[in-house]
Image: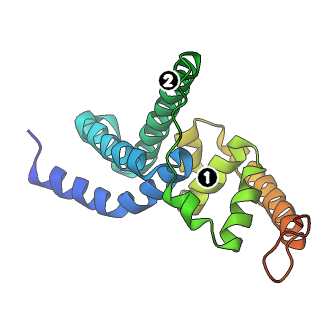
């Protein structure tokens, strides 16, 4: 049985990490419904592990790693299911996400387009850094060498800026793409 102190610490972790974890998972999954489920499951798994598996300062990194692994598993299952459905002649349309709806604003559309031009590892490191994680925490979440985080983040930011600038220069003040009729 867990002590009142354990419960209080876990509640504090939940309050502190729920929003950043939700943003991170939404960025990976693209679905609000999946995000809610994965975030809940991540906290549940962390709670089930108990205090013995992670020092208090490591819990946010472990929580994000759990969530990342759950997203990867979900995407793999979805990919297998979609391939199966395609073979059966049925294609299940992907639901439109709140993120896709919000992309109506030109600046967000450009930022997302630029983000998609990054390598997957660069995107993940950038998202985690924006969520407030240190290089050491990012290296634990992604199971990468800590020394590679800084240079990879620098390359990601440089590439993001270059692509964003290129995309911005293609749009006129009215928000229309110059290549569009």
> Is 62 displayed left or right of 148 in the figure?
left
- The residue lying toward the viewer, choosing from 46 and 174, is 174
Place of residue 139 in the rendered image (x, y in percent of width and height, measured from the top left): 59, 43
Residue drawn at x 69%, y 42% as measured from the top left: 121
> Is 150 displayed left or right of 124 in the figure?
right
Task: For label 2, count other residues whose C-alpha is less than 10 Å away and answer few (under 14), some (14-19) or many (20+).
Answer: some
Residue drawn at x 54%, y 26% as measured from the top left: 82
Q: What element carries label 2?
A: helix
Residue drawn at x 75%, y 43% as measured from the top left: 119
Place of residue 69 in the rendered image (x, y in percent of width and height, measured from the top left): 48, 34
For the image shown, how many numbered marks are present on the structure?
Answer: 2
- The residue lying toward the viewer, choosing from 64 and 112, is 112
**What colouring does the structure picture have?**
rainbow
Q: Between marks 2 and 1, how big is the CA–CA gap?
A: 36 Å
> Is 127 displayed left or right of 2 in the figure?
right
**Position of 40 relative to 111 (above/below):** above
The answer to whether any part of residue 4 appears in the image is yes
Is the N terminus in the top left, top right, bottom left or bottom right quadrant? top left
Place of residue 104 in the rendered image (x, y in percent of width and height, measured from the top left): 63, 69
- The residue lying toward the viewer, choosing from 181 and 85, is 181
The answer to whether any part of residue 147 appears in the image is no
Q: Determine whether label 2 and label 1 are within 8 Å by CB.
A: no
Is the C terminus in the top left, top right, bottom left or bottom right quadrant? bottom right
In the rendered structure, find residue 135 and report the number of the disc placed on it. 1
Q: Give the mark nearer the N terminus: 2 vs 1.
A: 2
- Closer to the eye: label 2 or 1: 2
Mark 2, residue position: 81
In the rendered structure, find residue 29 and report the number of the disc placed on it. none
Residue at the far bottom: name it: 173
Q: Is mark 1 on a helix, strand or loop?
A: helix
Place of residue 150 in the rendered image (x, y in percent of width and height, measured from the top left): 72, 53
């Amino acid at each position: 049985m867990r002590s009142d102190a354990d419960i209080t610490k876990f509640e504090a972790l939940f309050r502190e990490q729920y929003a950043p974890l939700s943003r991170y998972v939404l960025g990976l999954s693209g679905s609000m419904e999946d995000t809610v489920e994965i975030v809940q499951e991540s906290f549940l798994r962390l709670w089930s592990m108990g205090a013995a598996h992670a020092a208090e300062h490591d819990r946010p990194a472990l929580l994000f790693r759990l969530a990342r692994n759950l997203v990867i598993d979900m995407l793999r299952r979805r990919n297998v299911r979609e391939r199966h459905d395609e073979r059966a002649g049925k294609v299940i349309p992907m639901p439109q996400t709140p993120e896709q709806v919000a992309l109506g604003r030109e600046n967000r559309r450009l930022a997302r387009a630029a983000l998609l031009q990054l390598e997957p590892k660069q995107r993940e490191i950038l998202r985690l850094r924006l969520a407030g994680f240190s290089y050491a925490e990012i290296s634990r979440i992604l199971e990468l060498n800590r020394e590679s985080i800084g240079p990879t983040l620098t390359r990601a930011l440089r590439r993001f800026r270059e692509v964003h600038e290129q995309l911005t220069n293609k749009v006129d003040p009215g928000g229309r793409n110059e290549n569009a009729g």
